[in-house]
Image: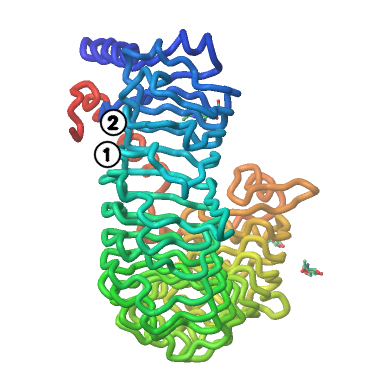
Amino acid sequence: MILLHFVAASLVFLFTQAVFRCPVLEKQTSCTCHEIVWWNNERISIVNCSFTNLKMMPNLSSLSKQNVTRLLLNGNDISTLSISDFDVWNIMELDLSTNKLQAEGIGTLSHLAGELTKLNLARNRITINEGLMFIKNLSILTELILDSNMILNYQTYSQILPNDIFRELRLHSLRKLSLRSCSITAIGPRAFIGLGSLRELDLTYNYLEKVPSAILQLQNMQRIFLGGNDIITVDANSFVTLVHLEEIILNYNELSSIEAGAFAGLEGSLKELELSSNYLSQIPTAALRPLRKLLFLRISKNNIRTIEHAFHGEYALNMLELDSNPLEFSADTFQGLEHSLETLFLRDIGVSGIPVAALSPLKMLSYLDISHNHFSSKTFDSDLSVLSVQTLVMSNNSLQNISSSAFSRLRNPIGLDLDNNNLSDISFIVSAPSCSFRYVDVSGNPLECDCKIEEILHSGTIFGMGLTGSCWLNNTVYELGSTKLAAQLNTFCNRTERNVRCPGTFDSNSSIQSNSGLSLINVWLLLVCILLQKCWK
Ligand SMILES: *[C@@H]1O[C@H](CO)[C@@H](O)[C@H](O)[C@H]1NC(C)=O
Ligand SMILES: *[C@@H]1O[C@H](CO)[C@@H](O)[C@H](O)[C@H]1NC(C)=O
Ligand SMILES: *[C@@H]1O[C@H](CO)[C@@H](O)[C@H](O)[C@H]1NC(C)=O
């Protein structure tokens, strides 16, 4: 009991200490102040002046003795800053996005260099090519966002990010640079000199027509975002020096070809490649072949029809996205992926059934999403016993009938998503062996609450309470697992009961008890941890 009092008292102490307020500033402006205290006792003090109609910098002098971690000034009409505006020097994160700042109006931010790690200047009026001296000497800055600013070259009418623009700025710690939507048409080959620490570069939504050679200077880069540009082809050796590059995003471009040596140099690093929403008519087999580490390939919304011997490579691809391609399947469509592919997306490819013959060689396939197709006309009776899938998503397929034998010979218990179809009869569930389904989702189907539903609910073919969806009875909607529905069905159906205990499930009472016991212990441990202020330090 004494200990409890101690805990309570310390908690009060902890919280009074945690309060960070700014009454003077709050009186003068619509800014607010608050503090977040993390479980490891790290404190983040936030001054929030977002969208408060400020025409100029607020007077922060009343905060000069406080530690301000994060200063939010985004969404105002601020056009000038001056050194004296920053009476607080220890700001780590400064958000100045969506204002009216030009380079001259910013002046210099070097007095913040000691602490500033994140700076957001998106959606201002900065003419980037005229120089970025205002960020000079921010030597511990790790993240810089310049999205939706501009590049203006009056003489050439082309918007080129100039050479050496970061060279003298001493941004030695910069890890992430974002230049989205800056109307960049080309990048000078030496534009990124001086950014040797960069790990992530975002050039999404510009007008680039090729992968800029300037990136070859960024030898520590791990992720590059080039989506939403006008890139037509990827030339050989476009990334050749970037031996740490793990992820390339090239979606929403004009790609119709990718040269054989496009990804040379990335053999031991590239894990994720995003090529969706382009004009490719083939899997770029030769370019992919040497990528030993490739795990995730997204190539949806292209124009790929046939796939033959396309996946013979040194990789062990784990995930493949082929949505919205006019695919035609054969027994060797997925040759090369037999022992690696676990997740496959085949949404919106216009098929009227599961291409079982093409999929059956995929020994590791556990997740298949074949939703948004047109399964309507036939009764669904694919032989799923030859597939190893553990989750099958067949939502939005206008399915009307499922044969009672479709799920009668499964290899593994399956999770089945059948939401948003046109099923009025789901009695195939009863025909399956006990514990066939980990869950079945039949939301958005025109089901009546009849005695077949009662039978399904007690059939023991679905683990636990894993049936979701609803049914209609006398113009009322009932949730399938609800006690209300059970009560209704009891009034006119003979109660069926099959007592089945599926492997790996508990009966509901004992699992609830052990859960709450566990969480009590967790809360207790966390409290002790906070009190000692020692956890994870
Ligand atoms: C800052 O204030 C704005 C407007 O009141 C609010 O929408 C936003 O969530 C706040 N941000 C934080 C980090 O508290
Ligand atoms: C749903 O199925 C019924 C027959 O059961 C059919 O008359 C109706 O047109 C189907 N609705 C849609 C949207 O396919
Ligand atoms: C309930 O069981 C009785 C006796 O077996 C049978 O005659 C009757 O048709 C059943 N009712 C329903 C709704 O299944």
Q: Secondary structure at mark 1?
A: loop
- Amino acid found under the numbered disc labelled 2: Glu
- Judged left or right of residue 194, residue 238 is right
The relative height of residue 295 versus residue 66 in the rendered view (above or below) is: below
Residue in view at x 28 percent, y 28 percent: 42
Do the residues under discs 2 and 1 have CB atoms within 8 angstroms? yes
Task: Point out the residue furthest to the front here.
Answer: 155
- Residue 8 image point, x, y percent: 30, 13
Q: Quadrant of the N terminus?
A: top left
Q: Quadrant of residue 487?
A: top right
Q: Earlier in the sequence, mark 2 or mark 1?
A: 2
- Judged left or right of residue 436, residue 374 is right
- Amino acid found under the numbered disc labelled 1: Ile
The relative height of residue 79 versus residue 497 in the rendered view (above or below) is: above
Q: Is mark 2 within 8 Å of ligand 1?
A: no
- Residue 112 image point, x, y percent: 32, 29
Residue at label 2?
115
Q: Which mark is residue 140?
A: 1
Q: Secondary structure at mark 2?
A: loop
